[in-house]
Structures are given as C-alpha cells and as structure tokens.
Amino acid sequence: MRKKDIFEENKELQSSLFLAQSYQDAWADYGRSLKKERFARWDYVVLTASNEEQVEGFREQIKLRNDEGFLPIQTKFLILPDPEGKRVGSGGATLNVLRAIAEEENSGDFSEKRILVIHSGGDSKRVPQYSALGKLFSPVPHKLKDGRTSTLFDEFMAEMSGVAGRIREGMVLLSGDVLLLFNSLQIDFPGRGAAAVSFKENVETGKNHGVFLMGEDGNVKKFLHKQTTETLRKQGAVNQHDAVDIDTGMVIFSTEMLNSLYSIISSDGIFDAEKYETYVNERVRLSLYGDFLYPLASDSTLEAFYEEKPEGDFCQELTEARKVVWELLRPYRMKLLRLSPAKFLHFGTTREVLKLMTEDYKKYQLLGWENQVNSSLKSSDKIAALNSVCSVNAECGEDCYLEVSYVHPGSKIGNRVILSYIDIHGETIPDEVVLHGLKQRDDQFVVRIYGIHDNPKAAITENGCSFLTGTLEEFMSKNNIREEELWDEEEVKTLWTAKLYPVCKNISEAVKAALNIYNLMNGTGDIETWRQSERTSLCSGFVQASPKALIDWQTRMHELVKMDSLEKVIREGGTLKDAEGLLQKSDLTKIQIEWLARHIARAEFGINIRLFYYIGSLLNNIQGEKYIDACFKEIGTHILQGTLDTIQFHKECKIQKEEHTVCLPLRVNWGGGWSDTPPYCNENGGTVLNAAISLNGDLPVKVTLRKLKEEKIVFDSRDMDTHGEFTEIKELQNCSDPYDPFALQKAALLVCGIIPKKGNDLKEILHRLGGGIFMSTEVVNVPKGSGLGTSSILAGACVKALFDFVGITYTQEDLYDHVLCMEQMMSTGGGWQDQVGGLSIGAKYITAEAGMHQYPKVKELELSQETKDELNERFALIYTGQRRLARNLLRDVVGRYIGNEPDALFALSEIQKVAALMRFELERGNVDGFAELLSRHWELSKKLDNGSTNTCIDQIFAVIEDLTDGQMICGAGGGGFLQVILKNGVTKEQLHKRLNHVFQDSGVDVWESKILW
C-alpha cells in the first residue's frame, strides 16, 4: 500500500474514532439534560409539519417520549403545521415559528431564549413510507440504552443537546431529513447576525446540495445552490483536495436577527395578522435557505436575489416580499462555521434509506449502529431489520430491509425489498419493491407498492416516471387505464397523486391488492377487481392515514419482536442469560399474551414448556410464578395424556378377596437419578441404576385392602394419622389438591379404573363390585423426606393391591405406567425410577427411550453371590437427623434443565454414563470401582443442584471420610438418608461409633438396611 493510501486510511480511522467519541459525548449530554437541573438546554424545540394530520403524528410521538421521561421537562415542545395546511415555504414556516413563540411568551422580543427549530414539514414524496409519521420520525439503525429504536428526531435531540450550551441565546434551524454528526464543542457563535454550519465534502457530493464560498473575513461570500462542478470550480469554491464547504442545513440566527425577521409579520413588536397573511402564504412561499440566507452573503445583489430560484413560482408578491427581506437582513452577515471532522446523512430517497440500512451502516458501526435492531431473525439471515420479525420458516433474499414488519412462515421475499409496517402471511414478494402498509382513519387498510428506484415526484410525461418494472405510462397502456381513472381533471399527473392503491378491510386483503398491481404491471393481474375497488394515492393515503394506528403498530411490533426473539433463543438452545432484557415489564402485554396463546396452540411440547418457564423466570415476580406454574402444568398434562391410553374404567371387575395386603421395599438410587424425570426423559430418554432395600429388617411400604359390607369407601393412613369415609363419588374424583391427605388413594382408584374420572354413582359401582372398600396405607418407621422413594413406592403398592383385590390382570410395565399417571394427576411431577426400584427386588439397570409415553426397560444386574455379599457388607445407610429441607427441589432441578443451563445439561448427561459404568463395575465384581463412581455421581449431583447438600451433610461426610470409599445422598438430598460404601474391613459398628461420638444424640446414625436380591 502506498504511503498516501496509508495516510488517507489512518486519517479516516482517526476521523471515525473522533466522531464516535463525539457521538457518545452527545448522548451523555442528552442524558444530563434529562436529569441535571442546571444543564444548559433548549427553551423551545419547534417541529414544523405540513398539515394537521402530520401534527397529530408528531404529537403522538412526543407524548410517547414525554410519558416515558425521554424528553427534558424544562423544554417546551411546539408542533406547528403550515397555516391551514397550505405550503408556505420553509421561510414562511420560520416566520410562523416566531409568531407561535411570541404568542407563548406574550412578547416579540426573543432575547435570552435558546430555540431549536427542526423543519420537518415535507411530504416525503421520495420516501413515501415516511409520509404519515413524517421523515423526522423515520428509524435510524441505532438501539438506544433504554431499548428503543432510535429515530432521526432522537438523534437530533442528542446531537444538539451540547449545542444549547454553545450559544447564549438565538435560534438554531435544521433540515429534518439531514442528520449531522459533529462535536458540539466546535460551535463558536459570536451572537451577531447568523452562522452557517459546514464541513468539507467532495465536490461530487456538494453539487447535489448547497455550497458556501467563504470570504477573507470568515463570512459567507456566496451561497451556491445545486450548481455544476464546473460552476463550483469557476467560482473558486473547490479547494486543492477537490472539496467544498457543503451546506449541512444547520444555521444559527442571533436574537437581533430574529427580532428583524419578526418585524416582517408584526408592527411595533405586536403580531400583525394582515402582514402575516401577506408574507406567509402558498403564493409567496418564502424559503429559509433561498430567501433568508441569500441576503446574508456579502457578494449578493438585490438584482440577483430577484432571480434566485424560489420554492414556488415567480410572482409579483414574491418580488415585493424579497425586497422587504433584503432591506431587513442585508445589514447582517453570516459567519461560516467549519466543522472538522464531521459527516451528514441525507434521508432523501428510498434508495438512500435502503443503502444506509443494508450497506452504509458499516461506516457508523463505531457509533453503535447495526443493520439489525430490536428484531428477531434467523441467525443465517443477512438482511437489515428494525422492530421486525422474520420467521424461521420464511425465506428472505439479499439486501432486504424489514421495518416494523412481520414475515410469517411460508413467505418468500425477493432481493432488495423494503417491507414497512406490514404483515406478510405466506405471500411471495418480488425483487426491488417497497411494500408499505397504512391503517386509515376509517379503520380500513391500504398497502402501497412501488419500485425502490421510483421517483413519485416525477410526472408521467417525464422519462424518469418509472413504476415497478416499467413506467407508469406502460402500466396504463398494458391495462387500458385512462388518465381520469388515476387523476382528477386539474391534478398534476405524477406517481405521487395517482389513485393506484385499493382500500381494503384488512391488511391481508390489502397485501393481495398491492401484489395484483405488480402483476398488472407484468400482464398477469386482475384488472376488473382493481377497477371496481375504491382507490387512493400515495398522497391521499398519507393524508388519510391514522398516526395513532402507526404508533400502535410500532408498539405491537416491538412487543412481538421480544416474544419471537425469546422463542428463537429457546429454539437455538440459548439460556436464560441469553434472553436477558427481552421482557422488561412486570407482566406480558395484551399483544404478547395473545402471541403466547397462538404459539402454545401450535408449538411442540419442548418449546411450549420453555416459553412458559423463560417468561416466568425473566419476569421474576408473582406474575412470573404463574407462568412457571403453567410450565409444570403443561408438563403434567402432556405426560398424563401420554399414559391415559393405558387407563380404562373397569366396569366388569369384582372384589376377589375379603382382605389383601401388599408390602414393598424402599429403593436406593445409585446412578442416573433425575434422568428419569419429565421432561428430561421425554426429550432425551433416561438411564438409572438403583436397588431395592429393606429397612430395619422390614418391607416398610404397606397397603391393606378389606371388603366392607357398607357401600362406602374408607381411607386410613396410620403414619399420617388420618381417616376418611366417602359415600359420594364426586369427592373421590378430585386428586389434584396438594393439601388433600387422601390425594394418593383417590388417584389410585381413578388410574386403576375402580371409579371413573367423571360422573357415575358410587353406590352403584360398589354394589357391582360386591361391597365397600377399606384402604389402609402406611410407611412403617421411615422418616418423612427420607429420599428413599416412599411416596412413589406407596403409589405402586396401592395400584398393585387394587389390581389384585378386584382381579384385574396386569404386568410390571402396567404398574410403572399407572404410577407415573398418578404422579401427574396429583401434580407431583415425579419420574419412574422410584416405583420401578420398589416394585421389583434386586439391583436394576433401567432405561427408557425419549417419548411422551415412557416405557422403562428393566434389566436386573447379573452379580455373583460374592459381589452381592460384599455389597451388603459394605453398604450403609446414615440418617442425617433432619427432614429434607422444604425446598421445591423438583422445580429447581427441572427448571435448570428447561432453562438450558450448561452445568445442568452436562450433569444430566454425565450421570447416565456413570450409571452405565457402575453396572459394568458391579457385574465384574469391582465394588471399589463402584464406590468411586458413587462419589463421582455425588459431585455431579451437586453440579445439578447445589441445594442437594448443606452444612450438616458436608460435616457428616467429612467426619467419616476415612471410613468410606464412596458416598452419595439418597433421593434429591438436602436431608433424609445418606448412603456410603465402607472401606474394606470397616464395619457398620465402627461407623456407628464414629457418628455417635461426634453427633451424640442428634439423630445422626446408621440404620439397619439390606439390599434385596
């Protein structure tokens, strides 16, 4: 690379870094203007608008920002339309600003006032999608710290916040479609006359704008507006670097000059309505830049001033007005303020907007500008988007720009397309078009379609009047459309005024109508449908549009983007951390609730439960808990649905025995625990290694059924000290109340088909069965919260006992299924390992494949008698002396899995591998290897849920560390029992003595247990 090129590259980099820092400083100043009482700020910010409809849109936007505290409360905001909606020119609009402020202040003296005026009253003909709300509120690819998408207005407010402190008094005027990037510290206004703000720009750019020629005194010598490069060079406006002083649209007027200007429409400092009407009207159309700045240039002459191109037409009234302006302003001069470095962005045409959003944004990345802001897109999408959603099942071409739009599944968007304020439901959008939706004041919809290169200002007689894939004349010719069908008799015949666009009842119909226009241009459309419709033009569509509806649409899309972004985070396996900031309010909005309902109705199980869980976790309040509840309810509903096909009401069964008792062992979990728990097992399958044990020489889980002569059902639970008698069936058919002491017994009757879930008469059922039923349930001498699977095993004992009692044939798999169903009916949400562990003896390797209906496959370990004996000799249960802590362990652990937390996902996968290795070591007789893996599992369990341990558990394990080779909690931990594998040669008596010595009579001790083979 040549030295000159390196120099230019470094110069550009330094300029960009300077502007980036200046930009950050401007936003910091703006933040201070909102909070610091003594910070210099504008007394007035005035926005000019073209008509009352545009004023309404501006007011809605200002109100929105005021309500959220995004505007300084000390500043007055005035929004002024051109009088009676007539175009009075930017100079006439400036005089109207002076009138309004004089009225506010009750004085024609503008001293000690800082006034910012943004002239934004254009129709935005070259960017029709911004007509309704005004180009001033068109979006900028910048996400603000508060989460909003920035607009030109927001950028103006930030960039100009520092300027207020650089002038003591006076008025700063800006053009509403030019954003100037600069450092406000470079503004040095002496407070006399006027000042024009400029910076050096290439002459090729300058020829399309205004150019200042500076004299030796530092004042503007000439103002050259849209001159050829040859003229600019001839006038001496081009320097040796081929650059000119470009007109940025920013000028500053002193208060003396403002008073002079006000005298045009006042007499002796008092507003004069007659003079106002003489100079502020659509015939004179005074120009701020052509009429108010021209006399300030030192080389200007009155004769040349009369010939200066006006905003409207030459007329006698304009000549007389210019004479008055010349006499008032000629005594003043205009200083040229050169900024360096500086840049400006012109939001002039559709092509410029598309280029900025898809390509030129890269030039401003140091400012934090991006091509995708507040949008939800596929990670592979290379498109620009603001406040928009593109479904993962939609296709979008290259260099597209989505603005406040939703592209639904099945849609196909071509290349270089702009979608603005629109929903696309499965349509195909051709290349290089703009599709813009408007809701009108009568609640009907219009979608305007035009080409990205079209110039709506061009007349049909001009070669430049392109339309879509041809010209407007070609469109008319192909479809035999007469001029009177598109324009009124006296109307200027341009694309802007052509009545092309059908008015429809809804946005979907309006999209189809717009695409029909495209098809008509290409010879395949329905001309009769087009002819028969009520139609509007780009111009009238802008007038009839509802600004509030557009702002509501913005809000709607902002809220939908959050939800769709959340769903994409979930689909891509993201964590809660990845979703931070998506929900910033205390609850979902109405729009978001409706979105959630639609998606829950059609999304798959895994997405649904995570939507509920992520929403609840992100809200992190009482409302959030409701969504988390909905998550677990959704899990239970799906699991229940998956097992209900095996549940049936047995109408023919009868009581077979006078009395029947079932006694079951407990279980100890060795490997893979938690992998059997929904929804993990449903999405991934599960692998568990556990064993059945006796406790204190007994099988502690007992269920006894006895036939009664009376036609009633009696429940008795000795360990719970509860007793209940039921003669009405309705009382037995609800088992979802967690505080119901008989929920388990009721669920058992329901899943076993003894009573139906709804309806029927209890006496009739019991009469058919042959008598009433007495059910006694108890878990003998086992502390609550033991971690030994008692509740699920008790459920299994109930099912087994009932089947035997009434003569229903079953398999072991039926027992597992029915217990899992019971768990969901009772909303306890457990898995399948506990009941499998207690319903069959031995050490078991249990697996289940992914699926909503779980089918555990049980493989009893093939161990030598020597290994069985060694295990029983070295295996010991220790009671911690405390119940498991009252924590919602199931929700905690399952929640971590649903939330895709990496530690939880790793641990759940790894513990299954440990279970498989445990089986391998035991079947080859290596109890030491098994013990080592048990401790490994314990470490993984703590990764999965750090609440599984506590100070007490840690202390117990620490005290006996030298006596054990392996240690593990029972169940979820936090209390209950612990299990250890003793070192070879260490006895349970030694273990007892150690614990008794340290913990004495606290309840921490060894309990007699035996693995049942």
Image (tube, helix red, strand yellow):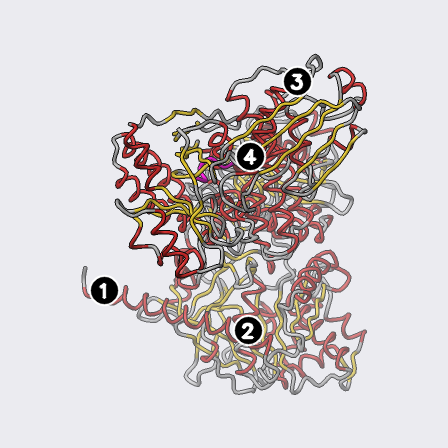
Which residue in the protein does label 4 denote?
Answer: 701
- At 40% from the left and 66% from the top, the residue drawn is 201
Question: Which one is in front, 467 or 645?
Answer: 645
Which residue in the protein does label 2 denote?
Answer: 30
Comes first in the chain, label 4 or label 3 = 3
Question: Against 715, is 6 above or below?
Answer: below
Comes first in the chain, label 1 or label 2 = 1
Between circles 4 and 2, the one closer to the viewer is 4
Question: Which one is in front, 381 or 123?
Answer: 381
Question: Which one is in front, 857 or 481?
Answer: 857
Which residue in the protein does label 3 denote?
Answer: 657
User: What residue type is disc 3 on?
Assistant: Lys
Question: Against 270, is 783 above or below?
Answer: above
Q: Is residue 746 left or right of residue 985?
A: right
Q: How many marks?
A: 4
Q: Is residue 165 visible?
A: yes
